[in-house]
């Protein structure tokens, strides 16, 4: 987190890449070559894999997932199978499951100091841009950075539109009913109810408006926007009065809510990663 903050302050986005530093798409490992390195499946697993491929060809993704999990039982930790599972979950629009399997691959390679092997396609699975058109539409409308919205959704709900926290926060951007109702009134959204928070478009609309509101309140400071979104703007404003705000990194460490403190770090890391990916993909 702090290495990323230093890089951001220096304006050097190349150093925001975990472990490795790349500048162009061609610097990445070839995707097919990467998968071939890990595609050795034993005989018992091959039958499950064959059935999974047949189900996948006719878009029976749930059945294909079941067969792939069978293959994985006979080939535990196999990266080829893990990626195929991530890909099938994505095709089945279970983005939460897709991200989880991609992170298993990432953590394995990280633990073995092999992140330089990770192809661009897997980075895109790790920092996905689901609902991007919708996010861009409302980000433009409320004059906010759509990459920050992606980062917040990644850490708030992991792209699970049906996610509900123990505190009652719902949907992609984890909005509680009282906040959603207040925003809906501001937007003249009629007949608002708590079930509407599970709608991706409604949730993104409300969440983006709220980020725009926090952007104005906290002078477009990303850390304070994230703090305000997680803990509330009133509490964040009190922390600004209580703690030294000249060094925002120290300010973060002084936040008494451990959940908010860690959430800021996670969202900021994802935000920088989305910025890094956007820079690379722009040249494709």
Image: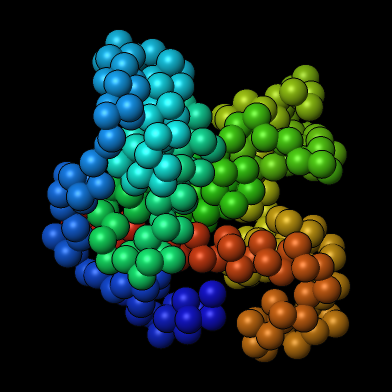
User: In this rendering, does residue 143 appear at all?
Assistant: no
Give me the residue at 65% from left, 29% from top.
Answer: 162
Give me the residue at 84% from left, 63% from top.
Answer: 234
Q: Residue furthest front?
A: 43
List x then y, in percent, for residue 237. Answer: 80, 70
Q: Nearer the viewer, residue 3 or 67?
A: 67
List x then y, in percent, for residue 37. Answer: 20, 50
In the picture shown, does residue 137 fall above or below 144? above
In the picture shown, does residue 19 fall above or below 234? below
List x then y, in percent, for residue 158. Answer: 57, 44
Q: Nearer the viewer, residue 229 or 119?
A: 119
Give the quadrant of residue 129. Answer: top left
Q: Nearer the viewer, residue 179 or 68?
A: 68
In the picture shown, does residue 67 fall above or below 100? above
List x then y, in percent, for residue 219. Answer: 63, 69
Q: How many marks?
A: 0
Q: How is the image coloured?
A: rainbow
Quadrant of the image containing the N terminus: bottom right
User: In this rendering, does residue 159 appear at all?
Assistant: yes
């Amino acid at each position: 987190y702090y290495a990323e903050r230093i890089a951001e302050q220096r304006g050097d986005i190349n150093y925001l890449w975990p472990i490795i530093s790349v500048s162009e798409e061609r610097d990445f490992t070839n995707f097919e070559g990467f998968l071939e390195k890990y595609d050795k499946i034993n005989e018992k697993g091959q039958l499950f894999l064959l059935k999974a491929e047949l189900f996948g060809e006719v878009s029976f993704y749930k059945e294909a997932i079941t067969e792939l999990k069978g293959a994985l039982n006979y080939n535990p930790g196999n990266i080829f199978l893990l990626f195929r599972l991530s890909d099938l979950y994505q095709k089945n629009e279970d983005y939460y499951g897709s991200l989880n399997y991609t992170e298993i691959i990432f953590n394995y390679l990280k633990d073995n100091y092999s992140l330089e092997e990770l192809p661009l396609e897997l980075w895109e699975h790790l920092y996905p841009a689901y609902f991007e058109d919708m996010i861009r539409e409302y980000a433009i409308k409320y004059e906010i950075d759509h990459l920050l919205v992606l980062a917040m959704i990644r850490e708030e709900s992991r792209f699970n539109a049906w996610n509900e926290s123990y505190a009652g926060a719902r949907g992609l951007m984890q909005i509680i009913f009282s906040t959603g109702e207040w925003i809906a009134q501001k937007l003249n959204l009629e007949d608002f109810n708590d079930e509407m928070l599970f709608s991706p478009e409604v949730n993104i609309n409300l969440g983006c408006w709220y980020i725009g509101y926090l952007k104005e309140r906290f002078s477009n400071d990303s850390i304070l926007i994230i703090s305000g979104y997680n803990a509330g703007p009133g509490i964040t404003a009190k922390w600004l009065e209580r703690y030294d705000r000249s060094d925002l990194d120290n300010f973060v460490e002084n936040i008494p809510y451990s959940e908010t403190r860690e959430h800021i770090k996670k969202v900021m890391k994802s935000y920088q990663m989305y910025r890094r990916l956007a820079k690379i993909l722009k040249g494709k």
